[in-house]
Structure formats: C-alpha cells, structure tokens
Image: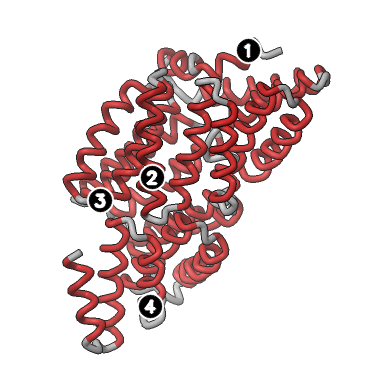
Amino acid sequence: PGAIAAAGAGVAAGAAAATLGALHVVEVEAHRWTGEFAAVEVAAGAALAVLAPATASWCTAIQEAIRAAHRTGSGVRLRALATEVEAAARAAERESAPWTAPLLRTSYVTSDCLRRVGAVDDADRLLALADRGRAAVGDDAMVAAAAAYAHAMRARFVGDPAAALVSSEAAYAAYLRAGDRRRALALAIACGDALVRAGRAGEAVALLADAQREAERLRAPSMGAHARLNRGQAHHAVGALDDALAEVTAARDAALAQGNRDLGGFAHVYRAAILLDRADLAGALHELDAADALLAHAPAVHGYALGLRARALLERGDASAALAASTTAMEILERTGLQEGEVEVRLAHIRALVATGDLTAAAAARDVALARVDAAAATFSEPAARARFLAIPVHAALRTVC
C-alpha cells in the first residue's frame, strides 16, 4: 500500500514521461502482489501508453498486464498484448533490436498464459522463439526460472508429469538463486500441484501449508489464495474431503474478492469434484454452473468442468446429456489439451458411451486412455514413482471401466 500511495503521488505531481512510466510500473507490481488485478490492468495500460517497446519497464508492464488479463478473464486483451510481445521477440531474433533478459522472461510468461487460454500453437511458437534467444543473455537466473516454468506448463498439457515436476522444481530453485522470494513462493505452490499429479499428495499438503504461511509473511494474498486452492486439491487426493472443501471454499472466496476469475473458476470446479465424491450431485452441478460463468476464456479448464458435469449427469441417470457433455470435453481436449482433468474427462466419456450402449467406441476410448496414462507413467524413471502415479484412483479406474 505504501508503494502504491507513493507512486500515485508522483503521477499526480505530473512526472515526465519516462518517470511516469516507471511510477506506473511500481503501481503494477504492487497491485499484483496485493491481488488487485483490475488495478493491475489499469496501471499497466497507463505504463504501456508512455513506455518504449521492449525496454525493461515495458516488459514488466506488459507481462503483468497479460497475467492480469488471464486472471480477470480478458482473453481478447491477452491475445492482443501477446501479439505485441511476439513482435518484440521477432525483432530481437532479426537483431533489429537485441534480446534482453526482461524480453525473454516476458516471452516465456506470455507463452504460458497463451497456453492456458487454449492458444496452443501461438504458445509453442513463442516458446520456441524464446528458447532460440536464450544464448544471447547468458546465465540469468530469472530467465532460467521463467523458461523452466513455461516448459513445466507445456509438459503438463502434453502429458509428461515427470518433466512438469522436474521443471517446476528447477524454476523454484532458480528464483531462490535470484533472491526473488515472491516468485519462489509462486513456484513452491506450483510444485505442490505437480506433486499431487505425480501421486505424492501427502507431501504436497505439507509443502502447501508452508507456502500459505509464507504468503501471509510476505503479505501476498493472491498467493495465499492459490496455496489454499492447491492444498485443498491435495487434501482431496488423500481423501480428506472436509479439509479439502474448507480450503477450496476459502480460496474461492478470496479469489473472487480479488477479481481473480481464473482462480475463482478453478475453485468452483474443485468444489464440484469434491461434492461429487460426497454424492452431492445437485451441489456439484450448481458449482459447475458457477464455473461456466467464469471460465469461458479458459477452455483448458472448462473441458475439465464439462467432464465433471458428464459424471454428475451420468450418476443422476441422464446418459444422453452426459454423453453430450463428455463429447464436447473430448473435443476441447483434442484441440487444445487440458490444464486439468484429462483422465477424468476420458473416464467420464467412456462411462457415458457404455451407458448409451456404444460398447465398441467405449472400448476404443478406453484403450486410448490407458495408452496415455501408461505413456505418462513411463516419464518417471523410478519404478516406485511409476507405481505411485498408476495408483492414483482415477488412473486405476480406467483398467476396470469396461
């Protein structure tokens, strides 16, 4: 709050253009960590209006504007800003302007955000462009961290959970090496998520409890909400449904109060998954309706929500509606990949096919799903790690579904 007030005073005093841009960037960064994402977009827009493209301050402003657009559900705005980042990156590759560490970091962050909103081809193109430019800046810990996390997210989408965990841990270590405690905290939270996906949810519960305490020490409420959301997911994975529901509910309330539609939508989806395991079909469908209103910009999460809707409809006895929902979810999965819930979507689709009498299609879908899970398990080099991954209940359920 002090930084925001000081920067605002400088803006009000009529600072010159270069100083004005720097003051708006201070506002951008302060609002980000306090979780005021609409304010981030306003301050970033003001900064970008006066800053020269590809400068360090411009990179900070546009990077945070892109993150904020993702969190507030402004998909059109995100893509427009991403076009500007790619233009700057292509100019650097042509050497009409040199690659810099801030531009590389911004390119990696933008790639990640594009992937989350379903723009997979754009994300991969920008990721490859940044990878080609890394040699130009040498061994920069912040660039290494941003690169590692962008690759972790790509691994998550393509079904490589081992690489997602290793790359998340590498990004966390790089931010610690750079002395950036806030970004290290964000990556600790991501590591907790990756541990859950690797079948190590018990470890994730403890890690995310530490992350939540660190968020409180750093006065970073947006990170605190994210830690609670992932901790709820970890509690769910170990069967502690009451703890899971409490954590996810608290995360939802905090995220929506901050204007974070992305995290709030995630929380509604997670609440639906927990309520389904408590046999509360009406409650789960209510949560999925709420999620739909928040996640139109994020097909990679909306697909998971549709898979859960298919499961709820099937358990309610509406096989036709379940098949329609799971078919749409599968179309999203095949078009963009899913940030969350690929196996749950595949399992719901198989069960809907069985329930509607299409056993041949169900068996074919099961074989594809099993091949995907076995390929993901094979990314772990240690037999014990592969066994933990295959023992995740939804993975094991595929082997008996039809």
Q: Nearer the viewer, mark 1 or mark 4?
A: 4
Picture quadrant of residue 239: top left
Residue 328 percent location from the top left of the image:
71, 39
Q: Secondary structure at mark 4?
A: helix
Residue 136 occupies which quadrant of the picture? bottom left
Q: Answer yes or no: do the residues labelled 2 and 3 have beta carbons within 8 Å?
A: no
Say the numbered circle drawn on residue 253. Answer: 2
| Location of residue 58 in the rendering, given as x and y in whole percent from the top left corner | 36, 72
Q: Is residue 178 visible?
A: no
Residue where numbered disc 3 is placed = 220
Name which residue lies at 33% across and 44% down. Answer: 225
Residue 372 image point, x, y percent: 61, 26
In front: label 4 or label 2: 2
In terms of depth relative to the viewer, which is nearer, 280 or 165?
280
Mark 3 and mark 1 lie on one chain; the one further toward the N terminus is: 3
**Amino acid bearing label 2:** Asp
- Determine the CA span between mark 4 and mark 2: 29 Å
- Distance in Å between CA atoms under marks 3 and 1: 43 Å
Disc 2 to disc 3, how far (Cα)?
A: 16 Å
Q: Amino acid at mark 1?
A: Arg
Left or right, 118 with respect to 224, comes to right
Badge nearest the viewer, 3 or 1? 3
The mark nearer the N terminus, 3 or 4, is: 4
Label 3 sits on a secondary structure element that is loop
Label 3 is placed on what type of residue? Ala
Query: Which residue position holds label 1?
Result: 399
* Secondary-structure class at tag 2: helix
On screen, residue 12 versus residue 107, left or right, reads left
Q: Which residue is under mark 4? A: 46
